[in-house]
Amino acid sequence: MPQGVRARDYYSVLRVLSNASQMDIDRAYQKMVKESAYDNTISRKDIEQAYRTLADPTQRSLYDYSLREVKKKLETTAKHKKMVIRRQKVFEFLRYAVIALFLVVLALFGTRYGYQIKSFSAGDQLYTIGTDQIVGQIEEIQDGHDFGRVRETGCLVKLPNGNEIWYPLAGIKASCYKK
């Protein structure tokens, strides 16, 4: 079958099996010619082409070979598509597994080290983690507060008894939460 020509199954045009004898093809051709006289959906041109191809043994063998090759290509393409779809499903599963693993690690990291990403501001009520006892209220946050040998961000906390005390922000983040 020439390249670029649409593949037609001449056996289905004449309504015979691929292992039909020459006599079966002749009978089918006569029957289809009669049917095409009163049925406009049947193409006389297709019937003629199918008969010319299948009636000649050389052309028929070439046609059978090309038909087998087309079927092989279609089967190969179908197998390839199945393989591609299967591969896409595996990658999609792995993608979701990695996302789930990332979320689990993030949750574990967040519970262990979540205090480092807390933000506090003036006016926040502070409670101790675990005991839920009130520590006090943040009055002021100061960058570079002097804590003896080190200067770091500090918070002025007003305690429940009215006293005020400076705490390093890192210490508050490690031991307190706000409501």
Image (tube, rainbow, N blue to C red):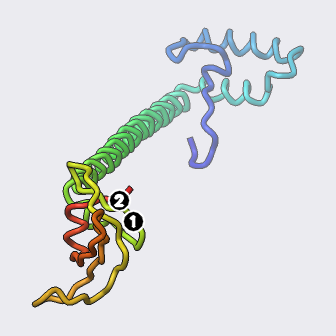
Q: Nearer the viewer, residue 126 or 98?
A: 126
Residue plotted at (44% across, 35% down): 78
Q: Nearer the viewer, residue 136 or 86?
A: 136
Badge 1 or badge 2: first in the primary sequence: 1
| Circle on res. 37 | none
What residue is shown with label 2?
178
For label 2, the SS is strand
Q: Amino acid at mark 1?
A: Asp
Residue 93 picture location, percent across and down: 34, 41
For label 1, the SS is loop
Residue plotted at (81% across, 12% down): 35
Reply above or below: 30 against 163.
above
Residue plotted at (25% across, 74% down): 169
Mark 1–mark 2 contact, CB under 8 Å? Answer: yes
Residue 134 picture location, percent across and down: 28, 56
Residue 22 picture location, percent across and down: 57, 14
Outermost right residue: 38
